[in-house]
Image (spheres, rainbow, N blue to C red):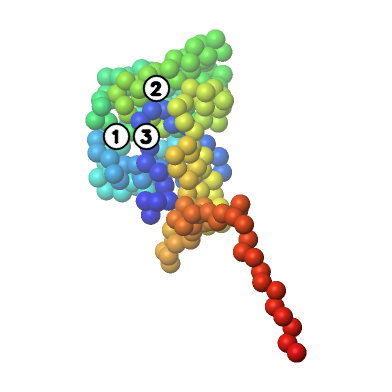
Amino acid sequence: MNSQLPTLDPGLTVLDDEGAPAALYRLVGRHLADASGSTYWLDARNAASPDAIRRHAAGRVARSIRVARAFTGYQHYELVRSLPAEVTPRTALVVAPNVASLYAEDDVPAFEAEAMFDATLELLGALADALDVPVLVTARERRDRVRDAADRTVTAERTQAGLRVDGPSFRTDVYWHDWGFQTTIPYWVELLGAAETDAEPAPVEPVAPEV
C-alpha cells in the first residue's frame, strides 16, 4: 500500500485535490504512519471530518492530530500566528486545508483580507523552512498565489483503478486493492527499462522457395 501514496517532504506543499476529496485524509494518514510527533490541523470549512480522519489515520496516529477550527478569516489568521509557539522540529506535520477560503468572505474587508492572507502564506512557508517541517495545504480560492508560494504541488485524482497522485518526486504506478494490485506501463518501464527505439532491426535472410 505504501507505494501508492507519498510521504511529505519538509517545506510547503499544496495539494490539488479537486475531484478527489479523500486524498487529503489519505496523504495525511500515509505520512503519519511513518512519522512521530504531533500534527497541527488548522481547519477551515469543516474539512476535519473525525470519521474520515479515523478511517485513514487510525489509533495512535489519529490521536496525535490536534484540530483547531476557524470560522472567520480573523480566527484563521490568529491560529496561524499561534503556530510558532506550538510547532517544533519534532512536529510531524502541519495541515491547513482551504487555506484561502475564509479570507474571501464578506466579513473581512478586502484590504485586510489581502494583508492577512499574504501574512498567512509567508508565515506557513517560513515555519516550514525554519523548522524543516512538512506543511500541507489545499486551496480553491487564490490557487495560483498559493502555488507560487509553495515549494511543490502535488495533484490527486480519482481513476477507475484508484487514487492517482503525482508530484515532483512521486507518481502512482501501482494501485492496490483487496484482491491484489494493478500496475501501469511506467511501472514496468522503470522495472525493466524501455525498449531501444534507435536500435537497428535484425536483418531478415531471404528464404529460398521449396522446389
Instruction: Count residues near mark 2 (Cα–Cα under 10 Å), then give few for <14, some for 14-19, many for 20+.
Output: many
* Residue 21 in view here: no
Furthest residue in direction top, as rendered: 111
Q: Kindly identify which numbered label has been placed on residue 92.
A: 1
User: Helix, strand or loop at disc 2?
Assistant: helix
**Quarter placement of the N terminus:** bottom left
Sequence-wise first label, 3 or 2: 3
Residue 114 placed where, x, y %?
53, 14
Residue underneath mark 3 = 9
Tell whether 49 sits left or right of 140: left
Q: Find residue 115 and report its horizontal and vertical position in percent.
A: 49, 12
Q: Are marks 3 and 2 in contact (CB under 8 Å)?
A: no
Q: Which residue is mark 2?
A: 124
Q: Nearer the viewer, residue 207 or 22?
A: 207
Label 1 sits on a secondary structure element that is: loop
- The answer to the question of whether label 3 and label 1 lie on touching residues, with beta carbons closer than 8 A, is no
Q: Residue at the spot x=44%, y=62% of the render?
A: 181
Residue 129's x, y, as percent? 35, 22
Q: What type is the residue that disc 1 sits on? A: Ala
Front residue of this view, candidates 111 and 37: 37
Circle 3 packing at 10 Å, graded few (<14), some (14-19), many (20+), is some
> Please, what is the three-letter code of the amino acid marked with disc 3?
Asp
In the picture, measured across the screen, residue 24 lies left or right of residue 33, that is right
Whether residue 54 is situated above or below residue 114 in the rendered picture = below
